[in-house]
Image (cartoon, helix red, strand yellow):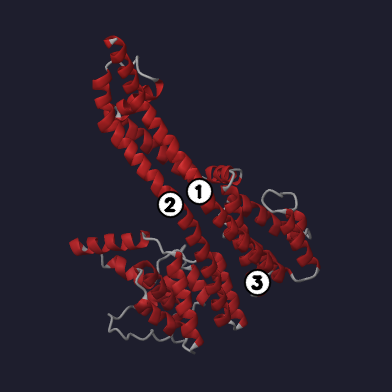
Amino acid sequence: MNPPSPPPNPKNEPEKNFDEIILDIKSDDQATPEKEIKKKSFKGLFGWYNYINEWVIEQSPIKLQEKLLFFQLLAAIIHAGISVPEALRMLEKQTKNEKLQHAIRDIRLLIEDGESFSNAMRRTGDIFNEATCSIIGAGEKSGKLNEVLKELVSQYNRLNNIQKKVKSVMTYPIIVFVVMILLSVVIVIFVVPKLIDLFGEVGNLPLPTRILIGASDLVRNQWPFLLLGLAAAVTLFIVWKRSRTGRRQWSIILINTPIISGLLKGMILSRVTRIFGFLISSGVPIIEGLKITASISSNPLYEERLLLAADDLSKGISIAENLSDHEKLFPSMLINMISVGEKTASLEGVMLKIADFYEEELERKIDNLSKLMEPIILALIAAGAIFMILAIYLPILRLNDQILGGGA
């Protein structure tokens, strides 16, 4: 049987060994054809420059907004009757993010060599999560790829709006805290030494002043050890947080932290219920849908419970019954709604309604948090200002009393 003809070469690119390309594509452990060719061309000084440039591109993030734009344009182009490979070729030229551009190119090449769209997306690494790939796969199997893409756009748009609101709420306090820290550093480095020269013995000074002088001595004289300690603490925290045990312990801490807990649960439950409902409505089996949903929950506690629910569902234990023992993660209202959906065989519709509810509740919580942040920040600024005033002016007042007493 003759091998398939190579894909068209509209850009007059150098001809490639097509048999090698097929072998590369069929092996999951190897890179895509274009990447393999680039690796072979890394020779000499210019080759090292290309290698470093490729590494930087691979490490660069792809924003949610960029993925949203990609699916929006892809849905619009496919709706116009253009084939998926040709649509990807058009988007490849328009995409500004080089990492996403490379991923689109690799997906197109894989599709042209016989892979399905969803499997080609899986081969791009961690750019597209398993839920997105499964939804695309369900749309391919049902012949409703365009409708599925429109729903994906809607989901990405909701998630993007939520992330924007959370970032807008957190930006203001972060800026305030950074400015406060910088001002404090300036004071302890440049102002406090003048106080020591002015007031003399530290032991005779008020407690706030002694604390400020101690902080100044630490920053000015022990800064190498301070930086090393800070770097070590940050490194240990990152290593611990990335470990399996650390991720779980960190999740437990966040789930039990006031204010943060409500936002975190709202974000997870809105995403989980939305994805699960849409997977079922797209034709994905419930057990497989639960496993996929667990993988995109981004929280080990929820991932463990959803995977266990998928295993127990295959043994005949309902989802509601399985999750009812963990009310801290899954509220009773959610369990009751899932139970109704399972009994009435309308689980997908119920899950999507629950997702709407949690998204609306999350928006209310974010709005309330933004209102709550202002008095909290003002209180912290006031506390810091009062401490600085006391530390600087108390010894001045004491010195003034001594002068007046001596003069009397």
Q: CA distance from mark 1 to mark 3?
A: 42 Å
Sequence order check, earlier mark of 1 and 2 = 2
Q: Which residue is mark 3?
A: 284
- The residue depicted at 43 percent of the width and 53 percent of the height is 171
Which residue is labeled 1 in the image? 373
Q: Amino acid at mark 2?
A: Tyr
Point out which mark residue 172 bears: 2
Q: Earlier in the sequence, mark 1 or mark 3?
A: 3
Q: Position of residue 6 (x, y in %)?
A: 38, 84
Q: Compute the Cα span from label 2 to label 3.
A: 42 Å
For the C terminus, which image quadrant? top left
Q: Amino acid at mark 1?
A: Met
**Left or right of 40, for residue 258:** right
Percent position of residue 403, x then y? 28, 14
Q: Determine whether the residue tagged by mark 1 lies in a helix, strand or loop.
A: helix
Q: Along the line of sight, which residue is nearer the eye, 7 or 186? A: 186
For the point 61% across and 43% down, the residue is 256
The kind of secondary structure element at disc 2 is helix
Which quadrant of the view contains residue 22? bottom left
Depth order, front residue of 200/88 = 200
